[in-house]
């Protein structure tokens, strides 16, 4: 078969054209120029191989896979049977572009590689940009220590979005500021700064996830939010711990350098507590805590690109988690009982004794948490040791609920006022109505999430009827209407 191929190539040598042209010349509008090519056979990226052959848009073969294919085809021959001499990537950064216009080489290419799937865009990494030295605008726009916001500025901006939680916002602002100072530190004096990963403890609906989202938006860094309940030990059905890094890579638009300076928020971390009532292998609890240790500490991890699990059809890349800030959060139900049990150990009879129910009415009992309480809850000490910043969020009171309704930049009432303003109708809530809504939300015991559900119920009929009647100019929500004892006050437009 080798002789037959050689004869065919020699006969068509004049008509066949093999041109060394940059990949970008053949890029279609669907193929961004800033993406790395991926081998359709071994799924290695352009930066991981020495040479890459581009047969047509979307189909690239690395030097090793091409050589193996030719060796199999020719019984030990080389790429020279096709008249192809690949260029060394060290001397030329452009990937080799093979263009066959006629017969046998084109047919051979289709026969060998025609059935290979093309690599989708979400599985292609962004190319690393060369360092810009002369362009001062780009240098100044770069996220560095000169452009890093100080803690008081970060907290002031958080105040525009988050009501209350003064202590939590102060702790987060300082921890984030110190973390990114560590990221940008060049370590010229030999003093290495350690990571300041955080553990947030607070009841449901108190704003844990919202604070992290707002923080990432203010700092303009990629954010990945992962749910710890779906994580399992490697080899079991579920997501591996590396899947949280895959989400961060997607959030950074497959830019590895940007992702390595991002934030990962692992929610429901309390669901990883050790199960005290089982003797079987705890594949979704303690084992996951142990799997997260290397990520929290800082390690180079193989991460699938554009997928949540590792397999042969997904390209892999290496991410360094040393400069990634990990924030863990959870409600930790019944942790208050463990704290009260520790605090009540000093209870005794006599003049200096304390009542055993002294802390029963303390809604912010989580603020007295210690590491020993978390260990008793089921968190392993190695995991807690990698989360040096531990703080709690306060439970919401009625006055906090009223402020959440009206004060934040994107408060719920502001959203509904904007919706009705599109129909040229004004919306107003009486003070008594706001207090009644907050009181209802507290009874549901789901935090600020209850406010949205209650407002949806109140506004349902109004949002349905408003578009019917053009004469309505203003709607006033009264306390009686919130208590289901009346109707909203309707004010008509002038002239109606």
Image (spheres, rainbow, N blue to C red):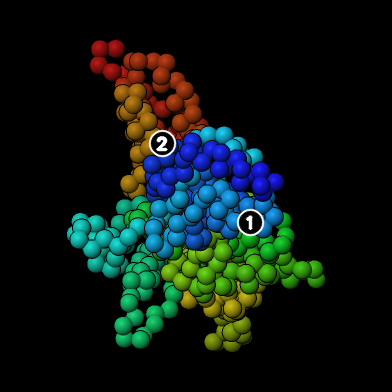
- Which residue extends farthest top? 496
Q: Residue at x 34, y 33 (%)?
A: 418
Is residue 148 toward the left or the right of residue 274 in the image?
left
Disc 2 on helix, strand or loop? loop
Q: Residue at x 37, y 30 (%)?
A: 419
Task: Give x and y (percent) for residue 167.
Answer: 39, 67
Task: Give x and y (percent) for residue 21.
Answer: 40, 46
Residue 34 is at least partly visible in this image: yes
Query: Which labelled disc corresponds to residue 77?
Result: 1
Residues packed near mark 2 inside 10 Å, few (<14), some (14 to 19) or many (20 plus): few
Frontmost of labels 1 and 2 is 1
Of residues 260 and 397, the one nearer the viewer is 260
Residues packed near mark 1 inside 10 Å, few (<14), some (14 to 19) or many (20 plus): some
Residue 198 is at least partly visible in this image: no
Query: Which labelled disc corresponds to residue 29?
Result: 2
Q: Residue at x 72, y 62 (%)?
A: 235
Task: Give x and y (percent) for residue 440.
Answer: 51, 44
Query: Which labelled disc corresponds to residue 96?
Result: none
Of residues 234 and 86, the one nearer the viewer is 86
Task: Give x and y (percent) for residue 493.
Answer: 28, 18
Q: How many numbered badges does the structure rendering display?
A: 2
Is residue 142 toward the left or the right of residue 319 in the image?
left
Disc 1 on helix, strand or loop? loop
Is residue 258 toward the left or the right of residue 264 in the image?
left
Task: Work out whether 130 lies above or below 124.
Answer: below
Q: Earlier in the sequence, mark 1 or mark 2?
A: 2
Of residues 478 and 302, the one nearer the viewer is 302
Is residue 92 toward the left or the right of residue 388 in the image?
left
Task: Work out whether 388 lies above or below 312.
Answer: below
């Amino acid at each position: 078969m080798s002789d037959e191929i050689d004869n065919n190539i020699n006969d068509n040598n004049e008509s066949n054209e093999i041109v060394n042209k940059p990949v970008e010349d053949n890029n279609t509008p669907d193929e961004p120029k800033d993406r790395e090519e991926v081998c359709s056979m071994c799924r290695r990226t352009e930066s991981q191989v020495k040479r890459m052959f581009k047969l047509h848009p979307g189909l690239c073969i690395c030097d090793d896979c091409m050589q193996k294919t030719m060796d199999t085809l020719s019984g030990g021959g080389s790429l020279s049977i096709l008249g192809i001499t690949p260029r060394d990537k060290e001397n030329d950064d452009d990937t080799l572009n093979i263009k066959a216009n006629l017969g046998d080489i084109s047919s051979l290419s289709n026969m060998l590689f025609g059935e290979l799937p093309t690599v989708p865009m979400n599985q292609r990494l962004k190319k690393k940009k060369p360092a810009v030295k002369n362009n001062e605008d780009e240098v100044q726009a770069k996220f560095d220590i000169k452009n890093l916001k100080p803690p008081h500025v970060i907290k002031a901006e958080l105040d525009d979005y988050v009501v209350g939680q003064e202590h939590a916002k102060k702790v987060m602002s300082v921890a984030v500021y110190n973390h990114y100072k560590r990221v940008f530190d060049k370590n010229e004096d030999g003093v290495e700064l350690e990571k300041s990963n955080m553990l947030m403890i607070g009841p449901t609906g108190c704003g844990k996830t919202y604070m992290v989202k707002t923080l990432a938006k203010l700092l303009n860094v990629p954010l990945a939010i992962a749910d710890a309940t779906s994580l399992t030990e490697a080899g079991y059905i579920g997501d591996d711990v590396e899947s949280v890094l895959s989400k961060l890579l997607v959030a950074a638009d497959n830019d590895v350098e940007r992702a390595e300076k991002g934030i990962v928020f692992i929610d429901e971390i309390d669901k990883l507590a050790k199960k005290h009532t089982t003797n079987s292998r705890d594949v979704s609890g303690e084992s996951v805590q142990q799997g997260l240790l290397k990520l929290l500490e800082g390690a180079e991890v193989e991460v699938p690109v554009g997928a949540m699990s590792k397999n042969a059809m997904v390209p892999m890349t290496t991410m360094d988690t040393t400069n990634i800030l990990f924030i863990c959060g959870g409600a930790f139900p019944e942790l208050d009982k463990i704290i009260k049990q520790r605090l009540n150990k000093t209870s005794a009879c006599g003049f200096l004794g304390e009542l055993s129910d002294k802390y029963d009415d303390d809604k912010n009992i989580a603020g007295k948490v210690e590491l020993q309480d978390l260990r008793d809850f089921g968190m392993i000490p190695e995991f807690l040791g990698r989360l040096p910043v531990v703080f709690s969020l306060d439970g919401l009171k009625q006055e906090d609920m009223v402020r959440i309704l009206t004060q934040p930049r994107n408060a719920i009432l502001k959203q509904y006022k904007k919706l009705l303003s599109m129909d040229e109708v004004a919306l107003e809530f009486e003070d008594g109505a706001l207090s009644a809504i907050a009181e209802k939300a507290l009874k549901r015991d789901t935090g600020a999430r209850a406010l949205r559900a209650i407002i949806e119920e109140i506004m349902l009929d109004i949002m349905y009827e408003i578009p019917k009647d053009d004469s309505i100019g203003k709607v006033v929500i009264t306390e009686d209407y919130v208590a289901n004892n009346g109707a909203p006050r309707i004010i008509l437009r002038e002239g109606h």
